[in-house]
């Protein structure tokens, strides 16, 4: 991502995540909110997998400062995101 987009991205992403969560809780928009979550998680998994494959040592900080760093931390985060992807996919694509 270009450097000039990171600030805007960092400001808007939490709002989009929160809106998606509220949509899942509000029955009329459950599918749309779950689809947004599914798409965001898919992008996060792809980005983290790319970083792990490149040997990059990053920490997204998504779950606090106690996260493991390096490849082991990325793999743990990828597995956690996959665990969150499954229920969001179920809600987005059921029926």
Image: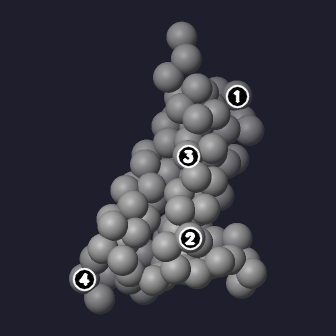
Evaluate whether residue 57 shows in this view.
yes
Q: Do the residues bearing badges 1 and 3 touch, measured as CB atoms within 8 Å?
A: no
Q: Label 3: which residue?
A: 82
- Closer to us: mark 1 or mark 3? 3
User: If the image is split into quadrants, where does the N terminus sit?
Assistant: bottom left
For the residue labelled by badge 3, is the local secondary structure a helix, a strand or a loop?
A: helix
- Closer to us: mark 4 or mark 2? 2
The Cα atoms of the two marked residues, 4 and 2, are separated by 27 Å
53 relative position to 64: left or right: left
Residue at screen point 52% across, 80% down: 70
User: Residue 57 in the image: x percent, y percent?
Assistant: 45, 83
For the residue labelled by badge 4, is the local secondary structure a helix, a strand or a loop?
A: loop
The Cα atoms of the two marked residues, 3 and 2, are separated by 15 Å
Q: Which mark is residue 72?
A: 2
Residue at screen point 58% across, 81% down: 69
The tag earlier along the polypeptide, 4 or 2, is 4
Q: Label 4: which residue?
A: 2
Classify mark 3: residues with Cα within 10 Å, few (<14), some (14-19) or many (20+).
some
Q: Label 1: which residue?
A: 27
């Amino acid at each position: 991502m270009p450097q000039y987009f990171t600030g805007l991205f960092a400001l808007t992403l939490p709002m989009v995540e929160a809106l998606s969560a509220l949509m899942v809780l509000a029955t009329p928009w459950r599918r749309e909110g779950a689809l947004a979550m599914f798409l965001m998680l898919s992008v996060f998994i792809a980005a983290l997998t790319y970083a792990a494959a490149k040997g990059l040592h990053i920490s997204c900080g998504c779950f606090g400062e106690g996260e493991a760093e390096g490849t082991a931390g990325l793999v743990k985060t990828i597995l956690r995101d996959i665990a969150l992807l499954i229920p969001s996919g179920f809600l987005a694509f059921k029926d």
